[in-house]
Image (spheres, helix red, strand yellow):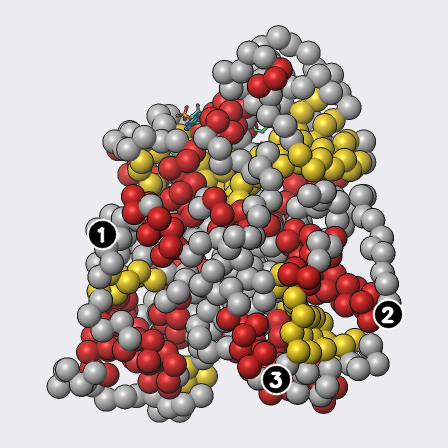
Amino acid sequence: MALSFAVGAYSSPIMCKATSVNNHSYAQDLSYIRRAAEISDKSAGFTSPHPNFGCVIATRSGEVAGEGYLYAQGTKPAEMLAVEASGELCRGATAYLNMEPGDCHGDHTAVSALVQAGITRAVIGIRHPLRHLRGNAIRALRSQGLQVDVLGEDMQSKIVEACLLVNLPLIYRAASRVPFSVLKYAMTLDGKIAASSGHAAWISSKLSRDRVFELRGRSDAIIVGGNTVRRDDPRLTARHGGGHMPIRIVMSQTLDLPKEANLWDLSEVSTIVVTQRGARRSFQRFLASKGVEVVEFDILNPRDVMEYFHDRGYLSILWECGGTLAASAISSGVIHKVFAFVGPKIIGGKNAPSPVAELGMVEMSQALDVIDVCFEQIGPDMLISGFLQPIPDLTPTIPSEDETFAIDPTVSPFESSIIFFYKTWDPYGAFSNFSPHPIQMPDEDGNYATWSSVEHYYQANKFIGVSNPVAQDCIGKIKLAKSPEEAARMGRLIQRQHPNLVRSDWESVKIDVMYRAVKCKFSIYPHLNSMLLSTAGSVLVEASPHDLFWGGGREGEGLNYLGRLLMQLRSEFLGESSAASENNCSAV
Ligand SMILES: NC(=O)C1=CN([C@@H]2O[C@H](COP(=O)(O)OP(=O)(O)OC[C@H]3O[C@@H](n4cnc5c(N)ncnc54)[C@H](OP(=O)(O)O)[C@@H]3O)[C@@H](O)[C@H]2O)C=CC1
Ligand SMILES: Nc1c(N[C@@H]2O[C@H](COP(=O)(O)O)[C@@H](O)[C@H]2O)[nH]c(=O)[nH]c1=O
């Protein structure tokens, strides 16, 4: 498949080709699907781990009535925003969606928005790549009488490619069960990523480095090896203004890392250090005192690390390491794409490092082919990009997690009587506090207020009742956070940086705060209530590998308080417990 589209995160803007059209409406379909793909890309990075969704509504006469795109996980679906923007013009109109909506909570929010607005036709770029979601929304729309045309089923068009490109991380991730991984490096014309001394600042131009900030902003995390930390003391932030800020990950076996490093400054974003089990415990304690999370692996290798971050819900990772770790990552088969910035400089030096160290190959016939190569000039530099692995074929359908476990039980550490939930797009993702279900909760004076999600309410509660006006300000800001992630980030950051703003009884009341919020959510949404009751007999575990209080941890070491609360509620709803406490909420 030739990848030469101007749309999407991972394409090159100089190779765009015109699409041939047969008649007006066909041309219109293509052009609006392309537009839906384009706008879906606007929030790249922010939607993760959800895919990018865009929706364009066009009237019968072919005018654009309104548009919308998913801003972040847990915010209003693109379809709902487009319907709101179009108003009455929705009646009899066509909705263009780059991808079939996920509708992962069984509440069909996107579908019902289109149906209720009076849309009569939906054109969809590609069906959802995940089997547990695939076809659901299309069936639901058709059952409501809409005509649904799926371009991805009907033709092999460039526009379908545009829809694929914009959600490449999801597609690769679903097929390979590791996050979509991009190796990026800057090298001189003679193939060096640093001088023999190790000095590397800078090979590529400022324009190219600005482009790197954009690439960072599209990624969930940036990863480097220990040596790059020692040598470069990088910041690894996305400094292009207002974009998504990826987590920083350091892979170090020895933990022989400096005590002073930009990556231990967490004021902008957090850092995770992955290491070998038992490595330098004293340094691990030092990192923990700085707030840096340390994760130990029995044997530190790129595949295990990527599988781990897959399980944590990461969609895409940018590798900005040197050649040593890059070679190890390529050998492990976890790198999907390469971005090589070539600066018109020659540095020489027989010991100067190159982008990829030893791969053990001895003949050119063994060389890895980079496919679907794009060339783009950026200022004085050339950016060459291409894929090390082809785009996964969506047919046959990428199996769901359950099916994968059934095919190969060794990939699942889970038992069948346990239901794990974590990310909102999982089959039981509605159990997550990030699920987009607003709740109404009473304040200290008994007045009800709407909170966009359980997470918003929970995070804001950390600061309730504190007399300091700054705490009141924090509550207001968290309430207005655009997504549950943002609310969580704000709440955790303020708690870490300003512990004096946290209510003194927080540790003793937080379970009750969560209980009331979750109880409200499962009381007012009947389909969530049914989903919870349908799990009777199963243990519920929040599969968060890092939250050892609310989640179950990586190896079951977590306390799983969220899972416990849900099981308690389930039992109360089933009438098995006489200890049901008062329902302190009202319908939204
Ligand atoms: N121009 C460019 O784009 C870039 C240039 N550079 C330059 O490259 C040089 C550093 O290159 P390099 O030494 O290759 O640095 P890397 O970033 O590849 O770091 C290598 C280190 O990664 C850690 N590591 C952990 N697990 C593995 C594994 N399974 N396989 C391999 N490494 C692992 C080890 O850290 P530990 O020793 O702590 O255990 C190892 O020493 C510097 O001069 C830097 O300036 C770096 C990045 C990009
Ligand atoms: N030298 C070099 C790069 N090096 C990469 O950038 C990191 C520094 O990032 P930061 O501290 O955020 O500016 C560094 O550790 C290495 O991973 N990148 C490039 O685009 N061009 C360059 O010429």
Q: Residues within 10 Å of mark 3 (few under 14, many from 20)?
A: few
| Label 1: which secondary element | loop
* Residue drawn at 33 percent across, 45 percent down: 408
Between marks 1 and 3 in the image, the one whose residue lies nearer the viewer: 3
Q: Which quadrant of the figure has residue 258?
A: top left
**Between discs 1 and 3, the one toward the N terminus:** 3
Say how many tags the image has.
Answer: 3
Find the residue positioned furthest to the top.
350
Q: Is residue 513 above or below residue 384?
A: below
User: Mark 1 sits on what residue?
Assistant: 556
Dot label at residue 24 = 2
User: In the rendering, at what x and y percent does residue 18 appear?
Assistant: 85, 53
Dot 3 amino acid type: Gly
Find the residue positioned furthest to the left.
578
User: Mark 3 sits on what residue?
Assistant: 145
Q: Residues within 10 Å of mark 1 (few under 14, many from 20)?
A: some
Q: Can residue 220 be seen in the rendering of this structure?
A: no
Q: CA distance from mark 1 to mark 2?
A: 58 Å
User: In the rendering, at what x and y percent does residue 198 appear?
Assistant: 57, 19
